[in-house]
Amino acid sequence: MPAKHGDAALTSLLLNSGRDATTGAWPVDDFGISIALHQAAMHGHQAVVKLLLDAGAHPNEGIYSAAANGHVEIVEMLLDAGGDLVSVVEEASASNQADLVLALINRGGDVDLALERAVGGGGKETVQLLLDEGATCHQIDGCHNCVDAAIVSGNVDVLELLLAAGGKLHICDYCDGPTAIAAQHGHVNMLKLFLDRGWAIIHGRLGTLDVASIYGQTEMVKMLLSIGASPAEDGLCLVAAAGADSLDIVRVLLQAGADPHNAEAIQEAARCGHTEILQALVEAGADPRMIEDPALRQLVLSGIETGGAVVPNDCKLL
Ligand SMILES: [Zn+2]
């Protein structure tokens, strides 16, 4: 395809050769022109982009791929032709293209929208640029702000930039707290930052250890235990790990003092058909007779008696 290879002359020839003398229609349909513009914009072929625009291609068909690949001049050309500024601000910011983002801001791009996307993409340079350009660490929805997005991204540099610029950690009873968000995503480096700075572990609606267990984040669980988190305080982490089929975490929690006589944990393992976890719990002292559901309890006890799988696979259906 000439558009992909940047052959402006050939593209011109193709466009001109088949033009309908009566209707003026171009030889390629709208879809064909769109693909050609996408290719030319992606590969930075400015002259071909110009030809395709003149031939009637819609600038939005190429603006995203031009932005994603850092072709600033082509983005400018497509914007001049009526391309959508918002979508290109989002793409350039998310992919940490500080030069392009600056050009877009100078064209009236929304600095706060750009900051949201830059934070999500973890681009330190672009975040700094946007803060310098007047972006603020704002609410993204009713509860979450840009700081939450930085924690989700796992980029500690971006988080520190936002906090230095006045961003606040989001703490409420309805959401996971900052360290719980880090735990969900397995961002051990984020937890280290909290510890290095002497900040408190902030749980939110669920404990950080519980969240790490729910999401199967073994390294995070180990780190939390190493700094004093207690699986004995409430049994939810063991129940969560049993339900999430996280055998490693179940073992780590039992070693760290989680109570195996936790009826909910063994019931959850049985209910979900997690045989190995159920075995680990039984080996640690759990009593299958604690399982409340009579049918499930009988199934597990029979399984143990016969020496086969503790829980048949079809237990998942119970
Ligand atoms: Zn909240």
Image: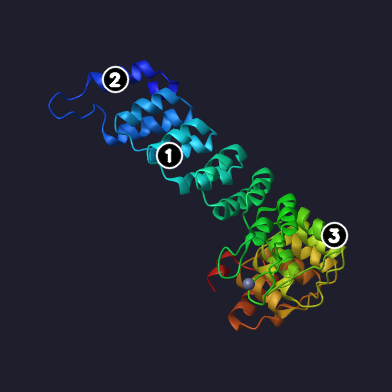
Q: What is the three-letter code of the residue carrying label 1?
A: Leu
Secondary element at tag 2 = helix
Residue designated by label 1: 79
x then y, percent, for residue 171: 70, 72
Front-lying residue, 143 or 266: 143
x then y, percent, for residue 75: 47, 35
Q: What is the three-letter code of the residue carrying label 3?
A: Arg
Q: Residues within 10 Å of mark 1 (few under 14, many from 20)?
A: some
Of labels 3 and 1, the one closer to you: 1
Q: Can I make out residue 308 in this image?
A: no
Q: Residues within 10 Å of mark 3 (few under 14, many from 20)?
A: few
Location of residue 204 (image quadrant): bottom right
Q: Residues within 10 Å of mark 2 (few under 14, many from 20)?
A: some
**Which badge, 2 or 1, is on the more N-terminal residue?**
2
Instruction: Identify the residue at horizontal 55%, vertical 54% (top origin).
Output: 113
Front-lying residue, 184 or 305: 184
Is 308 drawn above or below residue 91 in the view shown? below
**Which badge, 3 or 1, is on the more N-terminal residue?**
1
Q: Left of 161 or right of it: where is 70?
A: left
**Location of ligand 1 given as a quarter of the image:** bottom right
Q: What is the three-letter code of the residue carrying label 2?
A: Leu
Residue designated by label 3: 197
In the rendered structure, find residue 14 and report the number of the disc placed on it.
2
The quarter of the image holding the N terminus is top left
Front-lying residue, 226 or 244: 226
x then y, percent, for residue 282: 76, 71
> Residues under labels 3 and 2: Cα distance?
63 Å
Location of residue 60 (image quadrant): top left
What colouring style does the render use? rainbow
Instruction: Identify the residue at horizontal 66%, vertical 51% (top origin).
Output: 131
